[in-house]
Amino acid sequence: MDTTSQPWQMILDSVRFMPPSQTALVVLFFAFTILAGNGVFALHYRRVGKPIFRSLINPASFSITDFNLREWLLLAAVVAISVLLIVLVAHAA
């Protein structure tokens, strides 16, 4: 059985041969998307009075139906910056 055809091996090989600037942008993309996305939901939970950390861990509590305009704009900004980082990763190759 050829181990190089394993999906995780292909991912590791592609990361290994990335230029350092592209690797840094990929790490920045994942860190920003996770932290900023969770930050928007944490602000929302604080506004509605839910416990922040318990709500962030529970996937059933992710409700965007009662977002206000500020939270929607922040979420749109997170998406826009994430897309910009993806474009920068693609151009760094």
Image: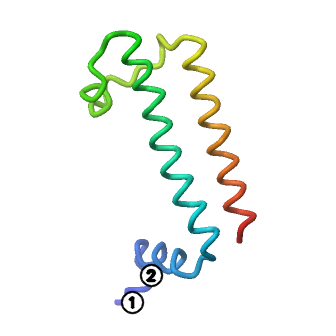
Viewport quadrant of the C terminus: bottom right
The answer to whether 75 is drawn above or below residue 26 in the figure is above
Residue placed most toward the observer, 74 or 59: 74
Query: Disc 2 to disc 1, how far (Cα)?
Result: 6 Å
- Pointers 2 and 1 in contact (C-beta within 8 Å): yes
What residue type is disc 2 on?
Ser
Residue 39, given in percent of the width and then of the height, sits at 45, 31
Counting from the top left corner in percent of width and height, residue 70 is at: 59, 16
Q: Residue furthest left?
A: 54
Q: Farthest residue in the bottom direction? A: 1
| Residue at (40, 77) in percent of width and height | 6
* Quadrant of the rendered image containing residue 23: bottom right
Dot 2: element: helix
Residue at the image point whose x is 32% and y is 30% from the top? 56
**Residue 35, position in %: x, y?**
45, 41
- Residue visible at 32% across and 10% down? 49
Q: Residue at x 75, y 64 (%)?
A: 91
Q: Residues within 10 Å of mark 2 (few under 14, many from 20)?
A: few
Decide: few, some or many residues near mark 1? Use Cα within 10 Å; few <14, some 14-19, many ≥20. Answer: few
**Amino acid of disc 1:** Asp
Q: Which residue is mark 2?
A: 5
Q: In which quadrant will I find the N terminus?
A: bottom left
Looking at the picture, the colour scheme in use is rainbow
Q: Find numbered disc 1 in the image and state the secondary structure of the residue it sits on.
A: loop
Q: Which residue is mark 1?
A: 2
Residue 52 placement: quadrant: top left
Occupied quadrant, residue 73: top right
